[in-house]
Structure formats: C-alpha cells, structure tokens
Amino acid sequence: MTTVPVQLESRPEGVPEGSAAADLLATDLGHLRRLVDGARDADVDRALGRSRRSL
C-alpha cells in the first residue's frame, strides 16, 4: 500500500463539540496509524464485536 502524508495548513475553528469533525481534529493521527499498522486479526474481531465504535 502506498501512503501519502497530508499536512494540514490550518484547522477549522468553531467545530461543534461532540461532532465527528471535533473527534477527528482531537485525534493523534500518527498514533492511530501505528495502532492500525499493528492490529492483529483478534484486535479487528474485538473492535467489530463492540456495540459502539470509535476511533
């Protein structure tokens, strides 16, 4: 897989709290990428078995 880094030049202000956009802006994308890269089959099965999903 080829990945292309994305550099954000600015972040929107006034994003509603509790919205998906706010959650995304608050997410450490580098850490999330490391979690994804290290996920095993059991991790995926456990995540998919949850009633509520999150980043």
Image (spheres, rainbow, N blue to C red):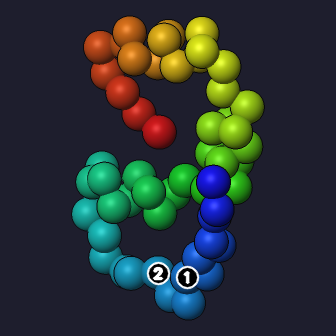
Give the residue drawn at x 36%, y 27%. Answer: 53
Which residue lies most toward the bottom here?
9
Q: Nearer the viewer, mark 2 or mark 1?
A: 1
Residue 8 marker: 1
Residue 32 vs residue 26: left or right? right
3 up-or-down from 48: above or below? below
Q: Is residue 49 left or right of residue 43?
A: left
Relative side of 40 to 9, left or right: right
In three-dimensional space, the C-alpha distance between marks 2 and 1, rounded to whole angstroms, equals 7 Å
- Amino acid under disc 1: Leu
Kind of residue at badge 2: Arg
Residue that label 2 marks: 11
User: In which quarter of the view is residue 2 placed?
Assistant: bottom right
Which of the 4 image quarters holds residue 5? bottom right
Q: Is residue 28 visible?
A: no
Left or right of residue 50: residue 16: left
Residue 44, percent from left and from top: 52, 19
Res 37 label: none
As displayed, is residue 17 above or below residue 43? Answer: below
